[in-house]
Image: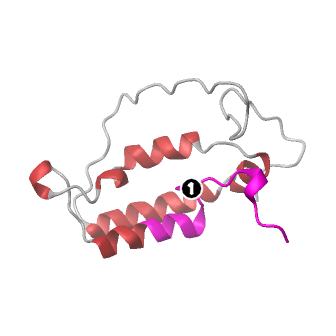
Amino acid sequence: MGAPPDAKIDYSANPRANSHGPVAARPTSSTPAHVVSSGAEAIEIAARLAEKFRAGSALRDREGLLRVAELDEYAESGLWSINVPNAYGGPEVSYATLMQQRRKIRRKRRLLRHRSPSRRPRG
């Protein structure tokens, strides 16, 4: 479940959420985002990404690291566009499918929201 406590972290590549220093701009991807064709494909992509995002999640949460690589991969997967209407080139999946794929991602890995270390529940 994550890296050992003494693992070295490159903070220039993995910035912390509450750091005082500026975060370097991300380079634009050279490959266009995938175009999702159906709700079933969106659910399949979400399930695959959720499993992948589990790796290293404990370290990212413990250290308060931004999920930069995960957000890049999510963007390239085409999932940001699944509720774009057909008239504008999107798959226009149902809101039920949209919520189902978001729940899949959130259940495995809280990618779509970041909790700062100071706002973690006490217990």
- The image quarter containing residue 96 is bottom left
Q: Viewed as shown, does residue 108 lie left or right of 117?
A: left
Residue displayed at 40% across by 30% down: 29
Residue type for callout 1:
Arg
Viewer-proximal residue among 54 and 63: 63
Spot occupied by residue 16 in the image (x, y as percentages of width and height): 71, 38
Label 1 CA crowd tier, 10 Å (few <14, some 14–19, many 20+)? few
Which image quadrant is residue 8 in?
top right
Which corner quadrant holds the N terminus? bottom right
Which is more toward the observer, 24 or 22? Answer: 22
Disc 1 is placed on an element classified as loop
Residue located 71% across and 48% down the image = 60
- Residue holding disc 1: 113
Q: Is residue 117 magenta?
A: yes
Q: Position of residue 86 (x, y in %)?
A: 13, 57
User: Where are the magenta residues, as a range?
Assistant: 102-123
96 falls in the magenta region? no
Residue 51: x and y in percent read 56, 62
Q: Is 5 on the left-hand or right-hand side of 2? A: right
Looking at the image, residue 50 sits to the left or right of residue 31; the answer is: right
- Asked if 107 appears above or below 18 in the picture, the reply is below
* Residue 31 picture quarter: top left
Colouring style: secondary structure
Vertical relation: 61 (above or below) 102 = above
Residue drawn at x 64%, y 24% as measured from the top left: 22
* Residue 113 x %, y %: 56, 56
Q: Residue furthest left?
A: 87
Residue at x-position 85% and y-position 72%: 123
